[in-house]
Amino acid sequence: MMEEDKEEGFIEELIECPFCGGFVPNEFECSLCGYELVELEIDGRTKITCSNCRAEVDEEREECPSCGTLFIL
């Protein structure tokens, strides 16, 4: 696949929901279990993922090693 044909995406930080343990975007409500995360100070685990395939990536990567997505800044 040529560079100009690659899909663009971004690096996304996901947080671990303290209620269900799933990793979700840092939003107001867990998209997996529905609990409100608005007022919580979440000190749990986070992971950095590709916005397209959800593979874990290093936050300094310019391209996803799993799907080849080019990360835009």
Image (cartoon, rainbow, N blue to C red):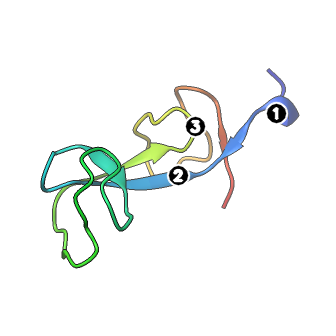
Q: Residue at x 84, y 30 (%)?
A: 5
Q: Is residue 56 left or right of residue 34?
A: right
On the image, the x and y values in percent for residue 67 come to 59, 26
Which secondary structure, mark 1?
A: helix
Q: Earlier in the sequence, mark 2 or mark 1?
A: 1
On the image, the x and y values in percent for residue 52 come to 58, 37
Q: Residue at x 46, y 36 (%)?
A: 54
- For the residues carrying marks 2 and 1, which lies nearer the camera in this image? 2
Q: Is residue 12 left or right of residue 10?
A: left
The residue labelled by disc 3 is 52
Q: Earlier in the sequence, mark 1 or mark 3?
A: 1
Alpha carbon distance from label 1 to label 3: 17 Å
The dot on residue 11 is 2
The residue labelled by disc 1 is 3
Quadrant into which the N terminus falls? top right
Q: Earlier in the sequence, mark 3 or mark 2?
A: 2
Which secondary structure, mark 2?
A: strand
What kind of residue is marked 2?
Ile
- For the residues carrying marks 1 and 3, which lies nearer the camera in this image? 3
**Circles 3 and 2 in contact, beta carbons < 8 Å:** no
Q: Residue furthest front?
A: 34
The quadrant in which residue 42 appears is bottom left
